Every structure is written in C-alpha cells, then in structure tokens.
Amino acid sequence: MMTLGVLKGPVKYAVYYGLAIVWIVPVIWMVATAVKPTPEVMSFTPHWLPSAITLEHFRTLLDKRPFFLWLFNSFQVAFWATVITVVVTTFAAYSLSRLKWRGRDALFLLLLAGMFIPWEINAIPLFFIVKKIGLLNTFAGVFLPLSALPISLFLLRQFFINLPTDLEDAARLDGCGHFRILWHVIIPVSLPAYGALAIFIFIFAWNEFFWSLVALQRSDVRTIPIGLKTLVAASDIQYDLMMAGSFMATLPALIVFLIFRRHVISGISMAGVQR
Amino acid sequence: MASRREFLQGMGGLGLAAMTNALPRPALAAPAKIWFNTLFHGGDADAMETIVKKIAAADSNIQVDLTQGAWTEYYAQLYNSVVAEAAPQLGIVDDFRYESVAQVLYDVTDTPAGNMLDRMGIKPGDFNQWGISLVGGKPLGIPLDQNGFGIFYNKDIFKQAGLDPEKFPETRDEFENACEAIKKIGKIPYHPALSGETRFIRRAWLGLLWGNNGKFLEGDKPAFNTDKGREALQYLVDGVLKRGWNKPGTNGNNQFLAGELAMLQNGTWFYLTVEKAKLNYGCSMPPKFFERRVAWGGYHLIVLPKQPDSKETIAKLETTAAFLKAFLPYTSLWGEMGGAVPLFKAGIDNPELKQTNTWRKTLGMFAQAAASGAMLAEPRHPKITDVDLAIEPFTQQAYNGTMSVKDALDQAEKAVDRVLSAS
Amino acid sequence: MSTAIPSADAVSRSSKARPDSAPAAAQKRWIQDDTVVGLLFLLPYLVLWSLFAVLPIGYGFYISLHKWNPIGGSRFIGFENYTQLFAVARFWNALKNTFVFAGCVIPLILGLGLGFALLLHRRSLRGAGMVEGALFFPYLLNVSVVSILWAFLLDPNVGIVPYYMRLLGLASPDFLNSPVFVLPTIAFVTAWWLCGYRMVVFRAGLNAIPQELYESSAIDGAGPIRQFFSITLPLMKPSILFAAVLTLVGGLRTLGQVIIMTNGGPGTSSEVLALYMYRLAFESFNFGQAAAVGFILFAIIFVLSMVLVRVLGLRSELN
C-alpha cells in the first residue's frame, strides 16, 4: 500500500531492528563505558563487554562534582517553567480564542511571529536586563523567559479554538464568569493538550543550554547541561567520568521514557502538530 | 561521597527549597563567611580544599565557602559576578588573563578594609617575583605560584625501547633518536600539547620560539613573524606531520594515561594525575631543541574581586585578610599537593618541602627551572589575552597541516596587529 | 484534537459555522466585547514575552552602539562596532560557517525525519513502537550529553567510529579536527539528536492523509514510488516547508554542540555566529561588539524566516 512494499518477512525485521539498534548504539556505548574499568575505557581497541562492572566512576564523579545539586537545579527550572507556562498560557490562550475583542487575531499573529525570534540570541542585552531586575544567578531568571514561549501559546490556542462551544454557552447562560468557565469547562476537556504541553516544556526547559550558560554562572546554581559542560575542559576528568556523568544525566529521561514511551511520543506528536 | 541521603534530602525539601531558590536571596545569616572561588581542578583543587579545611578547623572565626571549577568558564564568571555585584571575596587568576579582568579587582593595598598586606603582616619583599602582581604599577593580586610545562615520560616505554630511563634526552639529536627508537617498538613517541586543545598548541610553539631566542611581542607590535618564529613552528608541525611522532587532533593526556605515549609535554599540575595513574614516570625540562632548554610558564595570583559598597563588605574583607594571613604557612603544602612552585619565600625555602615525594618526582626540577629562568611567561600587556586568542586558530591550523607555517604566522601577525591597534 | 493540514482548516471553519444554541444568546454573543477581560488575561503572557523576548532586541541594539563597560562608563560610538566587525575576516567566516552548518543540518534532519516517518508509516511490524522509541530517544538527551558522547565516539585514539572505519579499510577522516569535515560532522550529530522530533511530527502528518487516496490510486495502477511523488509529497509539502523554516531558525542560532565539541575549532572552522558572539562577550569582554553580532544574527534569522513564510505561502500553517 505504501512505499517499500518490497521488504518482507525476516529481511524486514532485520532492517528495522538493525536500524533501531545502530541508531541507539551511541547510548549503549555510553552506558557500557560508564561501568567499564578505566584502562578499558582509554584503550585504543574497544571493549564492548566490560571485564568487570565497576561503579567507581560514579562515586568519583559525585565526589568531585555536585552532581545531585545540578539535577536538583535542573528540576527546579523545568518544574517552574512548566507550571508557570501552564498558568500564563491558559489565560492567554483563552483570551485569544474564546474571548472576543478587537485586534485579537492580529495580535495573535504578532505573538506568533515571535516563534521566529531566537530569544537566546539576545542573551547579551537579556543578561543586563535580568541583572537589573536582580534575577541573575536565580532560577527565576531562567524559567521566566521559558514560561512565555510562542509555541506554548500556539499549542493551547489551537486546541481551545477547536473545542465545541456548547458547554461554554450553557455555562455562560447560567451566569458563570470567565474563571469558572475556565476551571469547570475548558480545562477539564483540555487535559490531553496540557499533558502534551507539560511534556514538551519540561523537556525543553530541562535541556536548555544557551541562556542557562549565561545566566547561571555561579557554581551552585548550575543546571545539568552546564554542569556537564564544565566536565569537558577539566584536566582531572577523562572520558570514563564524562560517560558516567552523561549516563547519570540521562537516567531520569531513560526511566521515564521506558515506562511512558507511548505517552511521551503522543504528547510530542500533539505538541508538534499543533505547532 | 554525595549519595542517596543527599538526594533524598534534596527531594524532601523540594517545594520549600524551590521557592526560596527561585527568587533572589536576602543577605546571608553569617556576616563574616567569605566566598573563595578558584579555577583549579585536579590536584590543585584537592590541595586548596585541604588547606582551606585546615585553616577553618584551626580558627572558627574564619568560615570559607570554597568553590572550584572549570577553567574555561572561570573568567567570564569572575567578571560577570562583579558586574552582578555578587562576586566572591577571593579568586585566582593566571598571569596571562590577569590584565583582561584588571578592572574588576581591588588594589590589595587599597581595599575598603585597608591594606591587605599590612593586615597579613607581610611586605612585597617576602615574595619572589613580586613584580608580576603589578598592573599599571598597582598590586591587583598576591603572587601564589609559578607553574609551567615540562616533559613527563614513561620510563617503562623508555626501557622497552632500549633507552636509559634515568637519562632524559638533553639535545635535539638525542631526542629525535629516542623518538625513532620508540616508534620502532610501536609506541607513540611525543605529544607536545597536553590534551591537544588549541591554546596548548600555541604555548608549545611559544616554548620553541623562546628556545630559539625569538620574541613574541615587542612593545605594542607582534615580533614573532620572523625566521626564528617560523623555524620554531615548523619544528612543532613537522613532529606531527612529517616525523610521525604523533598525529594532529589527538589527546596527549589520554594517550599517556593509557600507557601508549612515551613523552608528553604537560604542566606542573599534572603531578597528581600521573601519580594516581600509577605510571612509572619521570619529569624533565625539554631538551635543547634550538638555543636553550626552556618551556612555557605562567603564574597564579590570589585576587580580590570588587565588592558592592556596604558594611557587610568590610566585615567580609576583614575575614578575608585573616584567611590570607592563615594561608601563608601553607604555601609549601600548596607546592607539595599542587605541584607548582610557591612564590612566597618562606614557602619555597621550607626544608620540609624538599623531603616530599612531589619534590623528588617533579617539583624539585621545576623549582630549579623557575629559579634559573627556564620557565618563561608570556609578556605582560593589557591585551595579551586577546592576542593569544587571535593567534590560536592559526597555530592550530598549521599544526593540523591545513595551513602552511608561513601563512599561519602571516595571518596571525595581521590578526594581532588588528587587536593591538583597536581602541 | 485536530491533526495535520487537511483537517485543521476544515475543523476551524466548522466551529465558526456552528449555529448558536438560542436566538437570544446569538444576539448577546454578537455584541459581546471582552476587551477588558481579554487584555487582562493576556497580560501576564504579554509582560513576560515583552520583557524577555522583545525588550532585549531594542536594548541589544542600544548596547551595540556603545563601547559597553558595565563596570566603568560606557561610551557612545555609533556604528563603530559594526564597521569594525565588517572589516574583520573572522566575522565573515562566522557568518559563512553559520549558513554552511544550517545548510547541512536542514536536509539531514528533514530527510531523516521524513525517511523514518515513511518507514514506520502504517507498517505492520511487531515491536514497531520499540523501533520508533529507539529512533526518537536521542531527542530527550540534552545537548551536553550528545556533544560529549559524540566527541568520545569520534576521538581519533579511543573512539569506536574511527576504529571501525579503519577496520573496514576506510580512511577515517579527522571528524572534528578537519576544516572540511567539522561542520558536516556536527550537523550529523545534531540530526541524530533532533530528527526524532521531526519524525514524530511527520508521522502524524502522514497519518492524516486519507487512505482512500492511496487506495484509489493503487486501483489506477500507481506503484509506491508514484504514490509518494503524486500524493504524499504534495500533501506533505506545506508541513515539510514549515519544518524547514523552523529547522533553519534553530540551525542558525546553534551554540551548544559547537561550543562543547570543538569550541569553534579547528582554528575557526566551526565558529558560528552564536559562538563568536559568546566569545566576544565572555572571553574578550567586548559587550558592545557582541551585542552587535547578536543583533545582526537576530535580524538575519527573523527577516529570513518572515520572508520565507511569505514566499513559500506558509501563512496557512500558522492558522
């Protein structure tokens, strides 16, 4: 029916599974390296199976660097970015989809153009602005800019616009104010969109690099991506520790993904498609 | 060992801690606790941590928050923290980055808490090479140590190749013969630039340039695009491109620690790493490739970044002075654990230092090199950092073989001219 | 929940055409003016967005007109930062690298994303979910992990990629240390990392194409290749082009992978504008000139994407 009807049977499975395995080999290698003894890591010939599983790299890395602090910091940034995004965007999307006022759609288009403004490119002036407000080296300085992304607005607004208006009209006839309509009608129906939005923003904020590099320079507020970057130039960190660190940084995502794979992918799908 | 306990504590305090960390913090509870942020990692960092712990244990009035970290982010962090009016009270700088951050540092004889040297009970004469702390005639820091490159060599590989492990090559011919012998047994002879990063390549070239009696800068003009400069760079490049001593793009540290590399140019700080790797190694100044046996070197200085105007600042600076005073007796421990040559006279002259393993393996050699002027630092110039950054891409391309030595130095000279003439 | 192109318009049109429940309510609705509430609800978003996304644009331009000194005094120098930049080969080099990188990354991400989506589309395969998961997973990694991991994989001494290439008798190029290979290599790593996202989005788009179209064309004798070019591609074109513009925006502002994998090297062969800006600001502390580079990059990205959206007729994607 579709392309590539040629592939059948075992050949088909070999191709698909082979592709998947080759694609994910780097991650497997990272995990294997993280538990290999150092001489095997640094050897000029690869050792796929470690001669012995060692956890010393994790211990050494945790000794040398405040890894759990980085994890905690990343979590705070991602958590608050998600929460505030949901709140702020709900009101904004509702306003832009359910309320009627002059210039509404024009303003929406303008805000949408913001999707093409690479806000981190303005890191230099943003640095000075955030410094003036006193939010440099705080998580608020990072999660606040992340809470007003045009893509979040787009996602939610598209979803709201496509909701049927019956329940709302009925509620309005009953004299409900906007807050009650939101709380009782719109939000419960939009949970799939919120799920998608939350997943998307959480991942986005967790992996944010450029602005965090500029705004979170003090060593106690570093997030995971920045903390890992500091491993690269350090003379006391070799590949064994770097892979251990990378593995620890990846573990939360790996666990969540293994359990909730379908939800994550469908959430991203919805977020991306609503674009 | 950071552990499960710390993790659970973290998760437990999630909500509350999140709120307090999310917003700007009010002034800290303990007014005299100071923040010391260093660019050290590895053995140096361990050394500093040990010393700070000992000082804090001996005097409960001195509380220090010590953070240490990666070198590449350090200077941006230092500068920006002063801009953000949230700078540490103490920092560390390399001499070749010193002047680029000069405007965010206090004159140590003229801080809001007075003259630090007086508070510490010392005078300039108590240091070797006090002059390196002067920028525009003012001491913006206190000399800590002199450090620099040397060649670490694997004695086992030497033995295997039929070379005397106790006698490191002293002339160019001896060195080249040694490389041939090492190639014959299938090992990698030499890596001149540590991990292969671009600044190390430039520094390796500088060592050869100075060994060839060439000059780097002459006042406000580049002086390296000469026959001597080209000869030096050509020799460096030939090592990896013609003579097969190594290949461009490789990480010498990795090769050495894997036991595949016979000779590695690395710094005084490499001592602890190579000790931990339990290699049978020796350490020596580079051979006389050209006219003299010299290597690239630098200095570390303790600096006081500028603080906001407040009463708290004075209290913190007083604690800082007390800390620095308590630090002085530990300068030999600094040398022993960090591998660099202490500049505080009482530190380097300490007879106990000469009994340590560090002195035997590396530090004694480096101290002698420092005293005899074989460790050469980059010229002092307000724009030396930009000069270095301008040259590096070209020396790297020559090293990689993607640019001829002549082109590389021509372009480097042009770039440096532009840097030095910009306002 | 609407999906991709064909139905989105249809659904929104239908919701607008939906009759109101009662004539009286219709009257009320028509004269409903929620301006105050509307703006009030929009306010938090507007404040955040203006403060963090819009204000810096103007402020950045302002800074770029000065020799900006946050400690001492800043000096107004007009367009000198810009003229200095335009006279420096390194700036043009960064500009070139930025476009070369984007030029490599767009076809890779779109090609791989679309290719994988097509491979998985309506395929009866046990474990298809696991395959999709494996192809998607790298997207969840952060840029530091991806960069560190691939720098390790490509290391000339201990990396497995050069090792196996040598084993297969291929000359292993200096991936991250060759001026020719460095940008395509970083582009490939970026594609490995991000194509999973595009794959998922394209899959949803493919799923929205009605089966009947394929069935009827199959009856007319069209094979899979014909079907791809006459049905799939035309219907997917808007979303592919839209993805291309978004990928272009992302590619032009890349910093993370470059700064970690090569820091602009070898030499300045992989120094892109975002990295050049970062180094001007935080290595040379020349904030005015860095702001100038930032403003130029912002202008390029914004204007280019606006023009492309207009020219490629992608306004409908935004609605």
Image (cartoon, coloured by chain):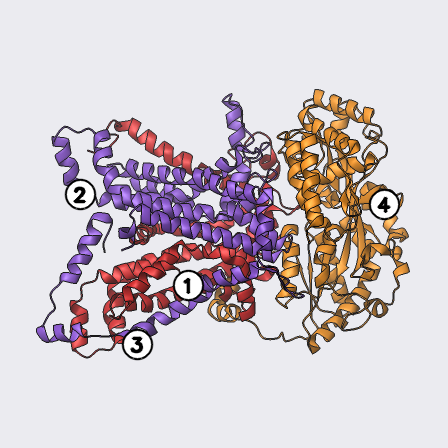
Chain colours: A red, B orange, C purple
Kindly state the secondary structure of the residue where label 1 is placed.
loop
Query: Mark 2 belongs to which subunit?
Result: C
- Name the residue carrying label 2: C210
Q: Tell me if mark 1 has few (under 14), some (14-19) or many (20+) residues whose alpha carbon lies within 10 angstroms of its own.
A: many
Pick whichever of labels 3 and 2 is earlier in the sequence: 3
**Residue B1 rendering spot, x and y as whole percentages:** 61, 56
**Disc 4 vs disc 2: which is toward the camera?**
2
Q: Say if labels 1 and 2 share a chain.
A: no
- Residue closest to the eye, B288 or A72: B288
**Disc 1 vs disc 3: which is toward the camera?**
3
| Type of amino acid under label 3 | Val
The answer to whether residue C267 is above or below residue B176 is: below
Q: Tell me if mark 3 has few (under 14), some (14-19) or many (20+) residues whose alpha carbon lies within 10 angstroms of its own.
A: few
Residue occupying image coordinates x 15% and y 58%: C14
**Residue C92 rendering spot, x and y as whole percentages:** 55, 43
- Name the residue carrying label 3: C36
Tell me whether the residue at label 1 lies in contact with that at label 3, contact meaning CB atoms closer than 8 angstroms.
no
> In which quadrant will I find the C terminus of chain B?
bottom right
- Name the residue carrying label 4: B370
- Name the residue carrying label 1: A147
Query: Mark 4 belongs to which subunit?
Result: B
Q: CA distance from mark 1 to mark 3?
A: 23 Å
Q: CA distance from mark 1 to mark 2?
A: 37 Å
Q: Say if labels 3 and 2 share a chain.
A: yes
Q: CA distance from mark 4 to mark 2?
A: 79 Å
Q: Please tell me the numbered disc located at residue A47.
A: none
Would residue A132 appear left or right of A166 to someone viewing this image? Answer: right
Tell me whether the residue at label 1 lies in contact with that at label 4, contact meaning CB atoms closer than 8 angstroms.
no
- Residue closest to the eye, C19 or C166: C19
